[in-house]
Image (tube, grey):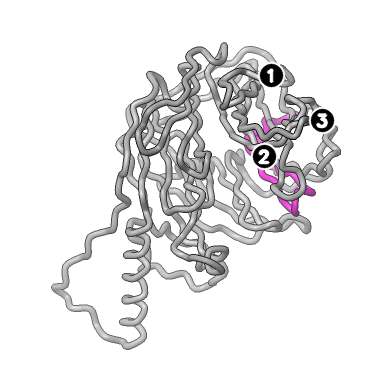
């Protein structure tokens, strides 16, 4: 099943976070220099697919390739906008309002809500948190009075989660259910639990120094003081963040989240490599564990209600079936064993009924490239090594 990425989106700096546009072939990239770049990949993806179709037709006709034929240029995603927003690394960014605006959170503790076309910040809050912001997410909910609220949820390295009303630009609630960094935020299933926000946290290790090479010349070393958290929390956004449940200490970092099985199951990736499965509403402890990843699971992404992609510190993107739990195979691998630190599902080129079957998977590693994997051939066992306008 292993394949090559169909396209690489090349940013101007190392990428720290990304988010796909909900209705267009565009992707938002947050960078370590504090800036954000918006790229359109639709034309490049169309060109790559056309070249793959031509190559396949040539193989079927057994027409030899001329020896002196020049190598075709690799299609490139085009940068549409660049936004200079923060003085510290971007930690999290997400599009909202139908893709017309996006919010950012950074290590400078600031939050911003930005117009995509103008680049103007409709709202900005310096020192929005006491610690560096680690995650942001948005949600539209109907509160108890029946009024629709456009909410921003932000988490930081100190374990604090805050709820913001983007219309009034005020902090609605500050929650301290976590004792350590907020590693992920995930909204409940759109049909079953659209008003519930899930959050996970990690561990402050007493003797372990965590070193990761972020670029060829930059190394980040972080020594932590004694502490433990490793919990999953569920809050009700309609009731200003009322705590619905909190898990016990899972004895390993919870690093990533995804909702599956039509909202009945929550899957958390852990620092030890196991997937912890929670039954919705029973937050005290995980109901099942699935092992098989040799290193930490830093990223999760749902393909459908039964199938998820996992991104590991070993650089592999795996395909896992949920209940029954089964490792289906490997979709691809990052070069140089760069860890997979982010996964996301974006639109391909389909429209109408074709749209549900035409997606790309984006994967983030320790470099300046967002890799796009073509999921049209996800169930095709024939690996085409000639495809991929920019593999690796």
Residue in the image at 48% along x and 46% along y? 20
On the image, the x and y values in percent for residue 267 come to 71, 44
Q: Nearer the viewer, mark 1 or mark 2?
A: 1
Instruction: Characterize the local packing of mark 2: few (<14), some (14-19) or many (20 or more) Cα atoms within 10 angstroms.
Output: many
- In the image, 315 versus 229, the foreground residue is 229
Could you tell me how far apart the alpha carbons at marks 1 and 2 are, in whole angstroms? 17 Å
Which residue is disc 1 drawn over? 173
- Tag 3 and tag 1, C-beta contact below 8 Å: no
- The span picked out in magenta is 251-272
Residue in the image at 33% along x and 56% along y? 390
Residue in the image at 59% along x and 29% along y? 152
Which residue is disc 2 drawn over? 187
Which residue is disc 3 drawn over? 244
The earlier-in-sequence mark between 3 and 1 is: 1
On the image, the x and y values in percent for residue 75 come to 28, 58
SS for tag 2?
Answer: strand
Instruction: Characterize the local packing of mark 1: few (<14), some (14-19) or many (20 or more) Cα atoms within 10 angstroms.
Output: some
The earlier-in-sequence mark between 1 and 2 is: 1
């Amino acid at each position: 099943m292993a394949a090559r990425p169909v396209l690489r989106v090349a940013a101007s700096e190392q990428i720290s976070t990304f988010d796909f546009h909900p209705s267009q072939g565009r992707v938002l990239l947050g960078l370590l220099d504090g800036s954000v770049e918006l790229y359109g990949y639709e034309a490049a993806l169309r060109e790559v697919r056309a070249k793959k179709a031509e190559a396949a037709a040539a193989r079927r006709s057994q027409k030899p390739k001329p020896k002196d034929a020049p190598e075709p240029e690799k299609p490139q995603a085009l940068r549409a906008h660049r936004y200079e927003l923060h003085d510290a690394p971007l930690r999290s960014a997400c599009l909202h309002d139908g893709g017309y605006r996006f919010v950012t959170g950074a290590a400078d503790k600031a939050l911003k809500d930005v117009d995509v076309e103008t680049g103007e910040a409709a709202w900005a809050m310096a020192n929005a948190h006491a610690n560096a912001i680690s995650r942001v997410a948005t949600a539209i909910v109907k509160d108890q009075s029946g009024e629709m609220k456009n909410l921003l949820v932000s988490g930081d390295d100190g374990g604090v989660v805050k709820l913001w009303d983007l219309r009034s630009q005020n902090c609605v609630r500050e929650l301290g259910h976590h004792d350590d960094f907020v590693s992920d935020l995930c909204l409940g299933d759109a049909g079953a639990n659209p008003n519930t926000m899930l959050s996970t946290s990690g561990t402050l290790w007493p003797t372990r120094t965590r070193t990761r090479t972020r670029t060829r010349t930059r190394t980040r070393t972080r020594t932590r003081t004694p502490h433990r958290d490793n919990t999953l929390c569920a809050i009700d956004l309609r009731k200003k963040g009322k705590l619905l449940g909190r898990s016990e200490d899972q004895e390993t970092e919870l690093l990533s989240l995804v909702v599956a099985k039509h909202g009945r199951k929550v899957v958390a990736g852990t620092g030890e490599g196991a997937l912890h499965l929670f039954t919705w509403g029973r937050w005290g402890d995980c109901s099942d564990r699935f092992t098989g990843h040799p290193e930490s699971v830093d990223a999760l992404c749902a393909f459908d209600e039964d199938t998820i992609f996992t991104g590991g510190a070993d650089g592999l993107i795996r395909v896992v079936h949920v209940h029954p739990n089964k490792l289906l195979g490997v979709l691809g691998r990052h070069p140089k064993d760069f860890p997979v630190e982010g996964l996301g599902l974006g639109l391909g080129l389909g429209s109408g009924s074709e749209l549900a079957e035409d997606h790309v998977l984006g994967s983030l590693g320790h470099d300046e490239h967002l890799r796009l994997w073509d999921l049209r051939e996800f169930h095709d066992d024939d690996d085409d090594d000639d495809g991929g306008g920019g593999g690796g």
